[in-house]
Image (spheres, helix red, strand yellow):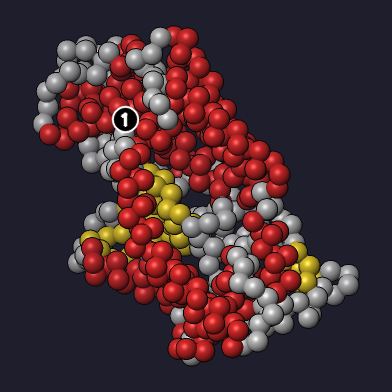
Amino acid sequence: MRVNRNVIIHLERHIVMPHRFSRSELLMKQKLVRNFSISHGLGTAFTALALTVATNVHAQALRALPIWSAEEMKAQCDRGLADAATAVDGLKALDAKGDIKRTLLEFDALGGIIQDVASIAGLMMSTSPHASVRTEASNCSKKWNAYWTALYQDSDLFAKLPKQGGDAIDQKYLNDLRRRFESSGVQLDVSKQEMVRKIRKEINDLNLEFERTLRDNITKVAFTSDEVRGVPAQVLDKAGRDEQGRYLLGFSYPEYIPFMDSADNDEAKKRYYIAFTNRGGARNVEILAELAVLRDQLAKVMGYTTYASMVTQDRMAANPQAVIAFLESVRKAAEPREAKELDEIKAFMTAQGAKETLSRWNIAYWQAKLRQSRYQINQEELRAFFPTQASIEFSLDIASELYGVAFNRTTLPTWHESVTVWEVRRKGAMANDQPLGLIYLDLFPRAGKFTHAAAFPTRGVSRVLGRKPISVMVANFNDKGLNYSELRTLLH
């Protein structure tokens, strides 16, 4: 791609020596570079390269994930959609028989535009401590979900994909892009494409509603002093009290799991178990039924016999039959061991004079009791041997040895005071070498937060565009020490 000398001079004014500018000045420089590049038809990829130079050389704060208010979330979401539309127009203007690398670079840049906003919305929807931000992030996610389907149904854009050429890496990316278009229904007629968009919107909206109900549930279950007998003191010390002096426990894992493992009162465990398993309410049960119907409808419109056939075709299993065969092999291997362990627990309960029968709400309790009797291991007492912060650093040390990298904690801004940020560098790298990427650790429960454990791949890597990866690990650990189960989750 040839670029006029005057264009280069103009861009140099805004990307040379970025370390001399304040954050606000640099943001203005980025805006000027973007607007100039697009107005002169330089293409998304060239613009992204210029912005990379203008951004990545700057201070650490510019490499952090953005922390947006609700108003900023809405503005950035709308801006991202507009930028993506501009990038698509640029792609459609390309010669379909042109350079494959140029075309794929433009698609890569488009993906970066989408990810820089959509992934932040997905993360903040699950982790922001502010309800207004979570709401706006959810609204943004709805917009991007709809945009994603429509984007990959665009037959004019699909026509810009080269038929062949490039190296093995180009072909892999090209095949991945083709599959995105095909799985969105680019090959369908207009009426069926509209049906796909409608069904997918309903599915995405229901998924968001389901997750929001779980995140925002602040229900507390009340227990008397007799009902909490056996529960670790550190759990009770953190619990609130109602006017009657009863302990109030919610649905976070550091509250629920120790209670179910340790509470002696069987009826209390049953009550907590039922409340926990129904924490999504009747509406979430309805949502699951609606999702099953919608998924089946989507598969039929897309030309598949079942939803399972549609989603497994791009995965390792390749088809539902392989999944079923694998699960059956696991069942056959596990069933005899399961029966043996259940018999052992029942025999132990009888020896202990237990009056209750083995049930879903007390199996964890009796497993813990048997383990303690047989091996003198108490999961709650293990927390003293695995302090949370030391366990986190131990896990990072293991990863450091395995992958030849070093993790250095930084002071970059985060969305909550308990979140930590770590630079990932090659071992032995010079102090002025750029990091390989960043990881954020958001590991402790709070109101409105994602309730399980997962890694959010917030920013992908692209060497040609200078994009470095950022991943966010979200979990709900006990901050006073980890038991075996939590340590295993952290390590994996």
331 and 180: which is toward the camera: 331
Image spot of residue 11 (x, y percent): 30, 28
Q: How many marks?
A: 1
Image spot of residue 202 (x, y percent): 57, 28
For the question of whether residue 315 can be seen, the reply is no
Task: Place residue 402 in its image quadrant.
Answer: bottom left
Q: Is residue 327 above or below residue 238?
A: above
Is 467 on the left-hand or right-hand side of 30?
left
- Please tell me which residue is depicted at 30% across the width and 43% down the height of the picture: 322
437 and 217: which is toward the camera: 217
Split into 4 quadrants, where in the image is the C terminus? Answer: bottom left
Image spot of residue 13 (x, y percent): 31, 31
Split into 4 quadrants, where in the image is the N terminus? Answer: top left
- Crowd around label 1: few <14 · some 14–19 · many ≥20 (10 Å): many
Is 316 on the left-hand or right-hand side of 331?
left
Image spot of residue 91 (x, y percent): 30, 17
What's under tag 1, amino acid-wise?
Answer: Ala
279 and 440: which is toward the camera: 279
283 and 491: which is toward the camera: 283
For the question of whether residue 376 can be seen, the reply is yes
Q: Is residue 487 above or below residue 126?
A: below
Residue that lies at the very extreme toward the right in this rendered image: 243
Please give the residue where the numbered disc 1 appears in the rendered image.
Answer: 109
- Secondary structure state at the residue bearing disc 1: helix
- Please tell me which residue is depicted at 47% across the width and 9% down the height of the picture: 191
- Please tell me which residue is depicted at 64% across the width and 73% down the height of the picture: 357
Task: Place residue 410 in its image quadrant.
Answer: bottom left
- Please tell me which residue is depicted at 22% across the width and 27% down the height of the picture: 174
